[in-house]
Image (tube, rainbow, N blue to C red):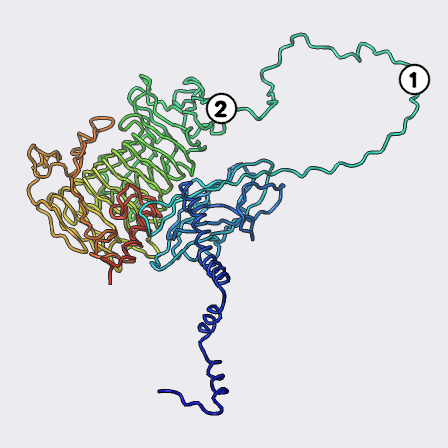
Amino acid sequence: MAKILSYNSPHHIQKEAEKENPLRKVWNWFSKQDRFVKGVIVVGFLLIIVTPAIVTQYFDIRQRAAGETASLYFTLHGTTSPLTTLSVKPGDDVLLDLYLSAPQTNINGLDITTVIPNNNTLVLANPQTEGPDANKFNSLLFNSWQNNTWRFSKVTTDVNAVNTGNLYIATVPLKAMSLGGGTISFTNAMLTSPTTNTSIPVSKQTLTYNVANPTPTPQPTSTPVPTTPPTSTPVVPTATDIPIQPTNTPIPTDIPVSPTSTSGPTTPPQEKIFYVSRNGNNTDGKTWQTAWNELSNIDWAIIQPGDTIYIDGGTTSMVYNSTLTIGKSGISGSPITIKLSSENGRNGQAIIDGGLTSWIECMPNAIGNPQSSPGGQGVRTVGISLNTQSYVVIDGIKWNGIVVRNHDNIGITVSGNNNTLKYIESHANDDPANGTQDGWGVKGSGSNLTLSHMNIHHNGQDSIQFNGTVTGFNLEYSYLHDHYCRHPDGVQVWGGTRSTGWEIHHNVITAGYLQGIFLGENATADYNAYVDGLDLHDNLIYGVEYGIKSKHGSTTNWNVHHNTLASMTASAIQWCCAAPGGAMAPMNVHDNIFYNVGGFYMPTVGGNTAFTNNCNYNAGGVTGNVIASGTISSDPQFTNPSAGDYSLRSGSPCAGKGSSITSINQLLGSSVPTTTVIPQPTASPIPTPVPADIDFGGCVGIEDFNLWSRAFQLGETVPGADINKDGSVDILDFNVWYQVMKSGVGVCP
């Protein structure tokens, strides 16, 4: 409709114009400018828009030209400029900030290892604190210092997170201690991004530092005033005043001479040999004639790392009537070794006798009368005690070369770390008091413990029991058998909460046990122990009530494979009796042979137990959270199972499965039984329907992440957790899980 103008139209039109769109005003103004001004305005506007993109692209091109898309560096606290050199004086406190620069790459995971020289020049003063940008990664995996090495690892499970730019990760408080210098470096830096399946290339900036005293300020010196020297009568020296120069006088060799310089390499102490023999005269232990004549007489004050102590075993045997208590630790690469002599006439058996002359009622029925030689020393509680020492090797050099017997509590107590015991027989150790009937072949705790070629039998209770945490345990080529007394188990973990890094392999466990392998007790005030991370393979277990068992709900990461379990009156495998389930996924049971055994009860939290490619003949049912596949129900065709020969006949349908140790004779017949190479199936034994479905629940979710993070923190390769199958569990596996979650395909509702 046309507007009708009146006398007051100009005023009305002016008000309407004031309400006009501001952009239209700008356009009207722009339209009135001449062509040159318009061009200048357009060019300036375009520069404003593209300049940030050009600058960003410039830095990205520079970084990509160097093959890097991110960088790690330290700054002085409160600043952002990379710090490459640092000079401080002793006593100074130093605050460093760790930055991660990723201008173009979205970072969803980081695993960084930083090393400070272990020379006491710069040390960690207080625990490091996370920077504000570290909170963008919502799951902490590692944040620990050990031996001047700091490992920091975090990831984000938020698939919508965008972490780019200069990220302030942490503040590290250090203190300058002594004079010297070094370089703070990043020995490992793995970064992941949802845009790639590989680690992000990263530039690792080193920081060189120097701890030095401040240079003193020169002080002005006054000009000395000359004085007239006094006159004096010259003194003629007497003969006693004239120093006499030595004429090739030899230096006594027994006087220690201090080195004139500490900058050069030092010669390590020479390894020495010492001797123990009942026939020695008990003086210095340096020869067989001067040998210490009892184990308790060893002079540990003179024993040093790398030294060897030989024990006389006589022509057939030699009995010692004292406890071997280790009194000194070795070091890495130079352990202290105690071993049976290999010389003819001294290589019989070294017997450590505890003096027990009576056994509990259940023992004589199985072993006969005590073969005790108390030697007037009374009854002792322990035969061998590692006494919290580390880097010790006790070696009988042959089956039953060292014998530990007749102690009223424990044959061998283990403790410390990085210790090895081998070729030792531990038997007839028990408490004769009525009602207790305790006694163990081996008992204790520690880390990185190896038991090899052990013969443990006829003790009052368990063959091996751990009542404390054991991190890193290896039981190999050993014979555990004939325990008939109170609640006997082959291997039991009873206390110490979480033990990790176990391998039990190439052993025979048989006769009399309630449980062959029992690695998990209820989480109660009295019992709370489990194993997280077990590789159980090539074991022959038969003639026991239960084969493999756990009763703790945190039991997890077990890989049970290539074992032979036979002739059991109860379950072959059972994880039970703990709420809400008997174990926690992942639990894997594959390529075993089960013969004439009870059932399998395997309730599992967080997923399922994978029961794959096993031979089950005359075996009970499989119940619990189990995914079973590839089961063979045929007779395995053992050579002579009634005589304890579980080798497979030619043409067995179970070829390639079961233990490579097939009989007691095979185990004892050679120093190191030959390991049969087991052909592996060409197909994956555990189906993975969806990438990153670690718990095999048919979809990917937070439970799979939780299982991966447990495996990653253990540092072990657990089937299923190595999602990208590159042979290691790392944050690249997390990144595959992240990408699946971000895609939404196969994700749990």
Residue type at mark 1 is Ser
Residue 293 position in % (x across, y down): 41, 24
* Residue 268, placed above or below residue 2: above
First in sequence: mark 2 vs mark 1: 1
Q: Quadrant of the C terminus?
A: bottom left
Asked whether disc 2 touches disc 1, contact meaning CB atoms under 8 Å apart, the reply is no
Residue 240 position in % (x across, y down): 79, 12
Task: Label 2, secondary structure: give it.
Answer: loop
Task: Name the foreground residue: 141 vs 288.
Answer: 141
Q: Residue furthest bottom?
A: 7
Residue 224 position in % (x across, y down): 87, 30
Give the side of residue 447 with respect to residue 491, left or right. Answer: right
Q: Which residue is mark 1?
A: 232
Q: Residues within 10 Å of mark 1 (few under 14, many from 20)?
A: few
Q: Which residue is mark 2?
A: 269
Residue type at mark 2 is Pro
The residue located at (49%, 65%) in the rendering is 34
Task: Name the foreground residue: 309 vs 558.
Answer: 558
